[in-house]
Image (cartoon, rainbow, N blue to C red):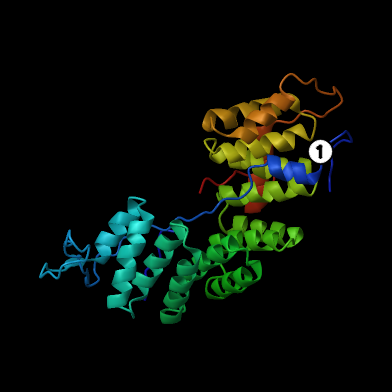
C-alpha cells in the first residue's frame, strides 16, 4: 500500500468596481500541496550512463561504463531539493524498472506536476491509483492536476472518490470547494469550505477561499470573519492580508483596509495587487456612519462558529 504523506449582505451602498475587478484584485486560491516524500525502503532502479562521443562522427561510443543505481531515497532527496524535473527523470526510470510499485508512480506524478508536465503527472497518478485504489492522496493530487488542466468535471469525480474513502478529510473538502468554484457553483463551494473547516478549524486556506467567494458574491460583511481569522492564525501570508483589505475596503472601512494592504506589501514586496490596492484606499476618508469593527472580535466569533462553540464559552485551543 502507498504511504500517506504528511499531509448577499452588502453593508452599505456606494460606488464599487465590478465583481470581475474584485476577483482580479483578490489573492485567490493557490495549490496547496503538502506532501513530503520519505520512502527509503524500496529496491533500486538503474539508469544507463551514456558513453563519450566520437569527436569525428558525433556518435556515442559504446562503453562498458557500469550503470548508476537510482533509489527511491535518491529521487525523494532531489524532489525535496525542488529539482522537480530531475526528480521526475529519476522516478520515470524507477517505474520502468518497478512498474508495480505504486509509490514510484505517485512520486513520478508529484515530480511531473511540480515541473509543469501535467500530462505525465496525470498518467502517473492514474497508474498509482490503479495499483492502490484506496490511496486518498493520489486521488487528491490527481484532482489538483485536473484543476490545473482546466477539467473541473474530471476533478469532481476524483475528489468525490477520495471523500468516499475518507469522509473526514478536511483537505478533500477544501479541494471540493475549489472544484465547485471552478464549476461556477459558489454556494456549493461555500458549503464545501465550511465542511473543511468543521474538520480542521485551523485550515487557513479554506478560510481565505471562503472569504474570497463571499467577496465575489458581494457578501463583504460576511467575508470579514473568515479572513480576519486566517490573518490572525497566519499573518505572514500576503494573500490573506490583501483579501481582508479588499473586504474592508468594500465595507467602507478604509483605515483598516490600509493597514491590511500595508501588511500584505510587507509580507511580499513584489505583490503588485496589494500595492495598487494600497494606493487606492490610503488617505480616503471614512463615512462616519459606518459601523466600526474589531477584527480580533470578528475572528473569535468566526472561530466559535466553525467549532460550534456557544457564545460565552471558552474557545478551544486545539
Residue 296 picture location, percent across and down: 64, 34
What count of labels does the image hold? Answer: 1
* Residue 200 place in picture, x, y as percent: 55, 55
Q: Which residue is drawn at 46% across and 79% down?
A: 133
Callout 1 crowding tier (Cα within 10 Å): few <14, some 14–19, many ≥20: few
Depth check, front residue: 286 or 108: 108
Placement of 99 over or under 52, stated as above or below? below
Q: Which of 315 and 224 is in front in this view?
A: 224
Quadrant, the N terminus: bottom left
Residue 32 image offset from top left, x and y in percent:
52, 54
Residue at the image point whose x is 73% and y is 25% from the top: 281
Which residue is at the front of the view, 214 or 50?
A: 50
Which image quadrant for residue 154? bottom right
Query: Percent x, y for residue 7?
Result: 44, 59
Which residue in the rendered view is the most extreme toward the front?
56
Residue at image position (61%, 50%) is 29
Is 239 situated left or right of 2 in this image?
right
The residue that label 1 is drawn on is 17
227 up-or-down from 64: above or below: above
Amino acid at each position: 500500500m502507498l504511504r500517506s504523506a504528511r499531509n448577499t449582505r452588502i453593508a452599505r451602498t456606494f460606488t464599487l468596481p465590478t465583481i470581475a475587478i474584485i476577483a482580479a484584485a483578490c489573492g485567490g486560491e493557490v495549490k496547496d500541496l503538502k506532501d513530503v516524500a520519505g520512502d527509503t525502503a524500496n529496491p533500486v532502479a538503474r539508469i544507463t550512463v551514456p558513453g563519450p562521443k566520437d569527436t569525428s562522427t558525433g556518435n556515442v561510443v559504446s562503453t562498458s561504463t557500469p550503470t548508476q543505481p537510482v533509489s527511491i531515497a535518491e529521487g525523494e532527496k532531489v524532489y525535496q531539493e525542488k529539482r522537480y524535473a530531475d526528480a521526475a527523470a529519476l522516478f520515470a526510470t524507477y517505474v520502468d524498472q518497478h512498474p508495480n510499485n505504486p509509490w514510484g508512480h505517485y512520486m513520478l506524478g508529484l515530480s511531473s506536476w511540480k515541473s509543469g508536465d501535467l500530462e505525465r503527472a496525470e498518467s502517473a497518478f492514474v497508474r498509482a491509483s490503479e495499483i492502490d485504489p484506496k490511496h486518498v492522496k493520489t486521488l487528491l493530487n490527481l484532482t489538483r492536476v485536473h484543476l490545473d488542466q482546466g477539467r473541473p468535471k474530471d476533478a469532481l469525480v476524483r475528489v468525490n472518490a477520495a471523500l468516499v474513502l475518507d469522509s473526514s478529510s478536511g483537505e478533500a473538502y477544501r479541494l471540493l470547494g475549489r472544484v465547485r468554484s471552478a464549476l461556477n457553483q459558489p454556494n456549493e463551494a461555500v458549503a464545501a469550505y465550511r465542511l473543511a473547516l468543521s474538520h480542521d478549524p485551523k485550515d487557513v486556506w479554506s478560510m481565505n477561499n471562503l472569504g474570497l467567494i463571499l467577496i465575489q458574491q458581494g457578501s463583504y460583511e460576511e467575508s470579514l470573519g473568515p479572513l480576519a481569522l486566517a490573518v490572525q492564525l497566519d499573518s505572514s501570508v500576503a494573500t490573506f492580508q490583501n483579501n481582508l483589505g479588499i473586504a474592508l475596503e468594500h465595507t467602507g472601512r478604509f483605515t483598516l483596509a490600509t493597514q491590511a494592504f500595508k501588511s500584505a506589501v510587507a509580507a511580499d514586496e513584489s505583490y503588485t495587487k496589494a500595492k495598487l490596492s494600497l494606493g487606492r484606499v490610503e488617505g480616503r476618508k471614512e463615512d462616519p456612519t459606518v459601523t466600526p469593527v474589531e477584527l480580533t472580535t470578528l475572528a473569535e466569533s468566526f472561530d466559535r462558529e466553525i467549532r460550534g462553540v456557544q457564545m460565552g464559552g471558552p474557545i478551544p485551543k486545539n
